[in-house]
Image: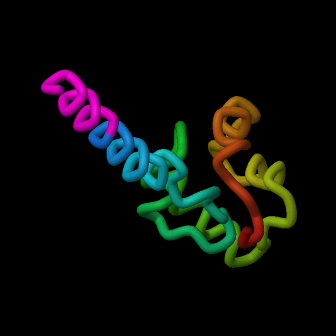
Amino acid sequence: MQKLKMVSILVLVAFLIVSFAQPVMAGKGKININTATKKELVTLNGVGKKKADRIIEYREEHPFEKIEDLKNVQGISQKTLDKNKDLITVKDE
């Protein structure tokens, strides 16, 4: 009986951990590089404060139509784009 009680508690705890962890693991989704704040942009791989400022300045004149347009920003290389392509979007999803 003691063993059954312990197993039940462990199953309940595991269920609660999975239930609460799932939304955290899902994240907020992709970062829209047309609307993201500087704070959001610096969370991208290889994007610091200066590059985030350049992204914001660029999009004010030239809104991004596709994620590849990010390479038009000074300091953003294909390598940086490749590291972030699954994390970014140009439209709200």
Outermost residue toward the top? 3
User: What's the residue at 71%, 40% (across, down)?
Assistant: 81
Q: Is residue 48 visible?
A: no
Q: Residue at x 24, y 27 (%)?
A: 4
Prevailing SS of the magenta stretch? helix
Q: Percent position (x, y) of residue 70?
A: 74, 52
Give the quadrant of residue 91: bottom right
Above or below: residue 15 compared with residue 83: below
Give x and y (percent) for residue 82. 73, 34
Determine whether, in the image, residue 79 is placed left or right of residue 66. Answer: left
In screen coordinates, is 69 left or right of 6? right
Q: Residue at x 54, y 50 (%)?
A: 26
| Viewport quadrant of the C terminus | bottom right
Q: Is residue 79 above or below residue 64?
A: above
Q: Position of residue 5 (x, y in %)?
A: 20, 33
Q: State the residue in front, 8 or 87.
A: 8
- The residue range painted magenta reads 1-11
Measured along the vertical axis of the image, is residue 85 above or below residue 1? Answer: below
Is 3 included in the stretch rendered in magenta?
yes
The answer to which image quadrant residue 61 occupies is: bottom right
**Is residue 31 on the magenta stretch?**
no
State the residue in front, 5 or 34. Answer: 5
- Residue furthest out toward the bottom: 60
Residue displayed at 66% across by 63% down: 33
